[in-house]
Image (spheres, rainbow, N blue to C red):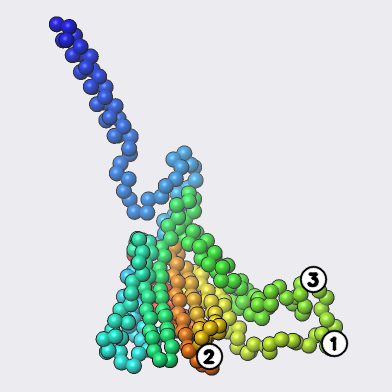
């Protein structure tokens, strides 16, 4: 008879435990799924960030046309099995192809080596009140600053000439900052050191490009140290919330045959325009 007295109490405890578990389960708030879910402070009054224009990315190795690859990476026989393998490219290893993709190509010849790479990054902002496009612009500006790209003037030409930017803070009228310019006609006013760069050097200097996406720049570096000579061309442009990076370089074992900026920049620029016209992912 005493054991029966405890049965209602045990049943009541079980019912309370079951109700508690059900309440905890209901408080989890759904399955948590959703594309580009953005975390934030539930109590925040900041407006919801605007989603990006692009919701996906292309398959990069197939996004570049075969004709473009032939021009940038010319081979003696396009039908050769090795050429076919070359033009297929090698996909970059990424953890999320919906957010980042890339492809690499490499051509080796007795005259030297050429490399080409294309990378796409779809930017998603997780900061309340900051849109995907705003975040992409911040990342673009950070890359442009790291490459020391001169600011563009209203006319679209660089506001600083290559010679001034390479002089380490030279005074506009000669001498270091803080020094008085030398009098006209005095020996100290005569140029010293290397001769002046060619008249068209500014055409191919690192600069802002105004015919790609929303923002774009090109960087050009020549390396003559070690064996041979190496020129690297980089183009980065932003279209809405997608950043596209192109790297195209050529190495020559003969320092007397320097890879030309005009040729390499022209090829990389044409590729960038082709990618920009493709409209990326949906």
| Residue 102 visible in this rendered orientation of the protein | yes
Give x and y (percent) for residue 153.
Answer: 62, 74
Residue at image position (54%, 79%) is 220
Q: Which residue is mark 1?
A: 186
Q: Which residue is mark 3?
A: 178
Q: Horizontal placement of 127 versus 31: left or right? A: right
Please tell me in which quadrant of the rendered image residue 194 appears: bottom right
Helix, strand or loop status at disc 3: loop
Give x and y (percent) for residue 210.
Answer: 52, 75
Give x and y (percent) for residue 103.
Answer: 36, 73
Q: Are marks 2 and 3 in contact (CB under 8 Å)?
A: no
Number of callouts: 3
Helix, strand or loop status at disc 1: loop
Q: Nearer the viewer, residue 25 or 213?
A: 25
Mark 1 or mark 2: whose residue is earlier in sequence: 1
| Residue 68 visible in this rendered orientation of the protein | no
Q: Horizontal placement of 230 versus 175: left or right? A: left
Q: Which residue is mark 2?
A: 255
Residue sitting farthest toward the left? 1
Asked if 175 appears above or below 96 in the picture, the reply is: below
Please tell me in which quadrant of the rendered image residue 181 appears: bottom right
Q: Are marks 1 and 2 in contact (CB under 8 Å)?
A: no
Helix, strand or loop status at disc 2: loop
- Kindly report which numbered mark, 1 or 2, lies closer to the viewer in this rendering: 2
Dot 2 crowding, Cα within 10 Å, few <14, some 14–19, many 20+ = some
Asked if 102 appears above or below 256 in the picture, the reply is: above
Give x and y (percent) for residue 48.
Answer: 45, 49
């Amino acid at each position: 008879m005493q054991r029966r007295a405890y049965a209602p109490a045990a049943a009541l405890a079980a019912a309370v435990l079951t109700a508690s578990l059900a309440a905890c389960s209901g408080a989890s708030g759904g399955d948590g799924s959703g594309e580009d879910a953005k975390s934030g402070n539930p109590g925040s009054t900041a407006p919801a960030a605007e989603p990006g224009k692009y919701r996906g990315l292309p398959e990069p190795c197939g996004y570049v046309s075969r004709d473009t690859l032939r021009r940038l990476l010319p081979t003696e026989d396009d039908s050769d099995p090795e050429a076919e393998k070359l033009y297929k490219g090698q996909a970059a290893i990424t953890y999320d192809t919906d957010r980042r993709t890339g492809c690499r190509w490499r051509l080796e010849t007795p005259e030297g080596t050429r490399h080409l790479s294309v990378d796409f990054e779809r930017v998603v902002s997780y900061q309340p009140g900051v849109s995907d496009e705003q975040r992409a612009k911040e990342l673009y500006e950070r890359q442009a600053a790291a490459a020391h790209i001169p600011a563009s003037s209203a006319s679209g030409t660089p506001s600083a000439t290559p010679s001034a930017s390479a002089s380490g803070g030279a005074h506009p009228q000669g001498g270091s900052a803080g020094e008085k310019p030398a009098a006209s006609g005095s020996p100290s006013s005569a140029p010293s050191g290397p001769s002046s760069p060619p008249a068209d050097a500014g055409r191919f200097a690192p600069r802002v490009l105004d015919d790609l996406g929303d923002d774009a720049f090109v960087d050009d570096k020549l390396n003559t140290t070690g064996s041979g000579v190496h020129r690297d061309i980089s183009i980065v442009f932003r279209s809405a919330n997608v950043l596209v990076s192109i790297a195209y370089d050529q190495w020559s074992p003969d320092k007397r045959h320097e890879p030309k900026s005009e040729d390499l920049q022209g090829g990389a620029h044409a590729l960038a325009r082709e990618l920009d016209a493709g409209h990326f992912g949906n």
